[in-house]
Amino acid sequence: MKYATIIDIAHELGISKSTVSRALGGDDRNVNKETKKKILEMAEKMGYKRNELAVNLRKQSTRTIGIVVPEMLTPFYMNFITYAQQLLNRQGYRVTLAQSHEDPEAERANLQMLEDYRVEGILISACHNRKNLDVYQQMINNGIPLVFFDRTITEISVPKVKIDDYIKSFFMVEHLIRGGKKNIVHFAGPTYIENAIERKRGYKDALEKFHLPYNPENVVDAGVDFADGEKAVEELIRKGISFDAIFCFTEMSALGTKSCLQRLRYSIPGDVAVCCISGTNLCVLVHPSLTAVEQPVRQMAEAASRLVMEKIENPSIPDETVLLNAAMILRESTL
């Protein structure tokens, strides 16, 4: 589809493109009333739309923020995008979205695309804590502010918004122990995600506090999705590992865990308690409902949006880390 341009309108009316440009820009002093009326009528007839990208590039400002997320299956990232977009739109910014599908190479390509589109800043939840450090630093060096949210990276000095994964994991495992659970398994996330490292540390320290032994066999690499949770349960059973509670890295693996346990006729929470971090409303759409730590997604989106706008306005301000509180919601799966 070919869009009508200022040149097309000028050609149709037999006048200069500068006159058309002035009229469409609202210039009443340098274009007489009758000419302006003809130009506006012709623009409407031809379906002319102003090229905002070209206008912004001439001003050295695209007023566009990129948001990069690892997945869009769970409500957390979709809600984050919704809240961030609402706030940024109110401040005159547009939003461009990209999904990495948990693939560092796809994330790298997305970041390059956003740089090519001349975005003014990027909100990103990283899918790997090592592989794209060079491209993050390159973008910062090129004057594009990055703000990490949820999945952050310690090695890069940028603003960050997150919860205290360590302490929330510690409290979750403590809840299981106080409920009488002794053989608690942790379905851990990938070791290249910093949240997973912190959640595993919280699990280990909670066991130590209550003088329960830490058994490496009780930490299973359970990935991030539904199928990973199912496979992790099957692996436990195949290895003959005893368990009376499973603490999952994330909601989707917890839902897969619960589904597999119920298919195998385990009672929840009678035989096995199940819980997770990063819970959303999906946790209450199943039976029994899942105990979870729920991140304050609206606050996270608002804080991340504020930080990126501040960096755009003043790149020299110190990099701020915002640590948000997250609520542990106790539900049927552990009570």
Image (cartoon, rainbow, N blue to C red):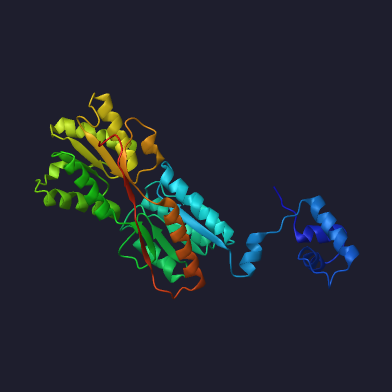
Given residues 263 and 127, the one toward you in this image is: 263
Given residues 286 and 17, the one toward you in this image is: 286
Q: In screen coordinates, is 334 left or right of 140? A: left
Given residues 37 and 247, the one toward you in this image is: 247
Residue 219 visible in the displayed image: no
Q: Position of residue 227 (x, y in %)?
A: 32, 35
Residue visible at 27% across and 25% down in the picture: 263
Tell me how many marks there are: 0
Given residues 99 and 205, the one toward you in this image is: 205
Q: Can you say whether 335 is above or below 64 in the image?
A: above
Q: Position of residue 83 (x, y in %)?
A: 50, 52
Residue visible at 43% across and 74% down in the picture: 317
Residue 56 visible in the displayed image: yes
Q: Residue furthest bottom?
A: 316
Q: Can you say whether 70 is above or below 119 in the image?
A: above
Residue visible at 58% across and 58% down in the picture: 90
Q: Residue furthest right?
A: 34
Query: Which quadrant holds the C terminus?
Result: top left
The quadrant where residue 63 appears: bottom right
Q: In screen coordinates, is 32 left or right of 289? A: right
Q: Position of residue 296 (x, y in %)?
A: 39, 52
Q: Can you say whether 281 is above or below 39 in the image?
A: above
Q: Position of residue 201 (x, y in %)?
A: 20, 53
Q: In screen coordinates, is 284 left or right of 233? A: right
